[in-house]
Amino acid sequence: MNQWIAALRSERIKLGHSRILLLAVIDPLLCVLIGLTAGMEKGDWMGLLLAMSLIHAMFFLPMLTGIFSAFVCRYEHEGGGWKQILSLPISRPALYLAKLLVAAGALALAQILFAISVVLVGLYQGFDLSLIPWELFATRLLGGFAACLPLAALQLFVSTMWSSFAAPLVLNMVFTVPNILIVNSATVGPYYPWAQPMLAMMQSNIDYNFGAFNLPTQSLMITVGASFLLFLTAGLMYFNRKPV
Amino acid sequence: MTDMMIETRNLMKKYKGTRAVDALNLAIPQGEIYGFLGPNGAGKTTTIRMLLGLIKPDSGVVQIFGKDLRKDRLQILRRVGSLVEYPSYYGHLNAIENLETIRRILNVPKSRIHEVLATVGLTKDAKRVVKGYSLGMKQRLGIATALLGSPELLILDEPTNGLDPSGILEIRELIKKMPKEQGITVLVSSHLLSEVEQMASSVGIVNQGRMIFQDSMPNLQRKAGSEIYIALSDAEAGVVTARELGCFPRLDDGRLVFKGLDNGQIARLVAALVDARHSIYRVEERRKSLEDLFLTMTGSGGAETDISRIDAGHGAPRAVGLRREAAQ
């Protein structure tokens, strides 16, 4: 546990001068534009959330997940840092989990900023703050964040396997683009890590009642949890044995 | 007698069927600067990576501080500082921040950062981004990183590789100070005999993954043997003078060549030659090169395969050339 916190604090410094977290700001800013032009009926908070979630959950969240997961390995790939850091008195799982947590933290930041931007757009358009369906909002936003975690674990696995910053990103991009088709399938959609954020944020409502969107939240979350454990275990096992 | 800092037994690592490291027994006593010598591709880096637990040996045991690396890896690594192959660094951070990332894992006081920067002479450039450092500075930062945790054992893999002569000198002086000032045992690998000769107190030579010599530096020097070349006005008359003193030189291009002379013999010889009215132009000592040493140590049969393997591309002419040298 101490090792893990030490590794986390060490990762913190490496993020220091990078502008990577700016990406977590750009995403909600673009979603604000969509929210402002969506022309929602006054007071339709859920409608606004859905409208703004479309690009955010379908495209930005999976992309950001891939970028953050690759980014936490980037400096080790570049400067030959794996040899150095793995010669230190720190266990490999502790280091791996620290990196995963940094990526998850950056995603949480993006999701929080997104939530704030939804509320601000609503207020700007004169929606009544007291009418926000908090419980639904929280389920969608937390669910969306949780649904990024299997992908984060998978992308971190790939990022430690390939000594490159760009290659995992290309892979991520290639698998993100078909999202729009894959959510139509109730059989494949829930198991497709790149589509899970979108399903979690937009499922079973009046506008989206086709394909994989029809699944109950609970069964989607079970799939999310199971795939997270699967990818995390595979990644940890690989990293623990990886020759450096 | 078990004051060994590093001890390996029958260490073996295979890559695609060939043994990069084979039956390797390292024994490094405390307080030594151990020169780990061998040509490129001899298995030095592979061995060092096994010592640090970066790769797992296919068989054999590594003991550091008398503990088994497989069982007490983290405890051992806490007391080891290392620099493997080329220096590792985070280019977008300055030297202090680079060391801080490591310090947080080692959990040593912040003051250590400035101490190690002073040790390697980087205090002035500490706030510059490392991307802009010269190779020598990066290498010194690497050594600073290795020293950060106040290690008892320092493992440096080719620390002078790619440096200019003044950089090499600086690093060498730095390494030589370690056992004296801080009681640190040092393992330093190199492919240059001259390099190791100038800093190591004991030496291990590997070739094709096998240890072919392991002893103290003076013993290696004795084994390598040196020859004294004397260039003078009349070499043939000089031979007669030398014989009168009981030295039997061979002639080489107008020079007398002696084997195994001590200081007293050289002094008497030079005095006698001067007395005999010779003009003495040069008295020089020539060491055998690392290649020659390998030939002597591995025997001619082994040497032939050695050379052809080292220089696979244009092996034939080089092997012939070396054999001719050896035959001289």
Image (tube, helix red, strand yellow):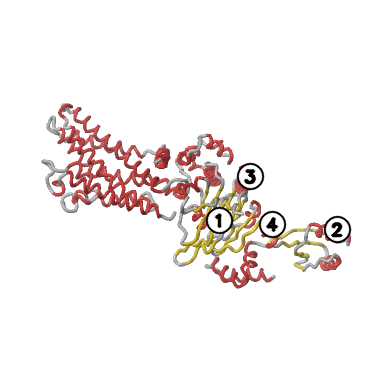
Residue B287 shows in this picture:
yes
- Look at mark 1 in the image and give the residue it sits on: B7
* Image position of B54 (left or right of A116): right
Cα distance between the residues tagged 3 and 4: 19 Å
Quadrant of the snapshot with the N terminus of chain A? top left
Instruction: Identify the mark at residue B177; answer none if there is no mark.
Output: 3
Mark 3 residue type: Lys
Quadrant of the snapshot with the C terminus of chain A? bottom left
- Look at mark 4 in the image and give the residue it sits on: B218
Q: Are marks 3 and 4 in contact (CB under 8 Å)?
A: no
Cα distance between the residues tagged 2 and 4: 28 Å
Q: In front here: B197 or A172?
A: B197
Q: Chain of mark 1?
A: B
User: Is disc 4 on the same chain as disc 2?
Assistant: yes
Indicate whether B53 appears above or below B103. Answer: below
Mark 1 residue type: Glu
Dot in front, 2 or 4 = 4
Cα distance between the residues tagged 1 and 2: 49 Å
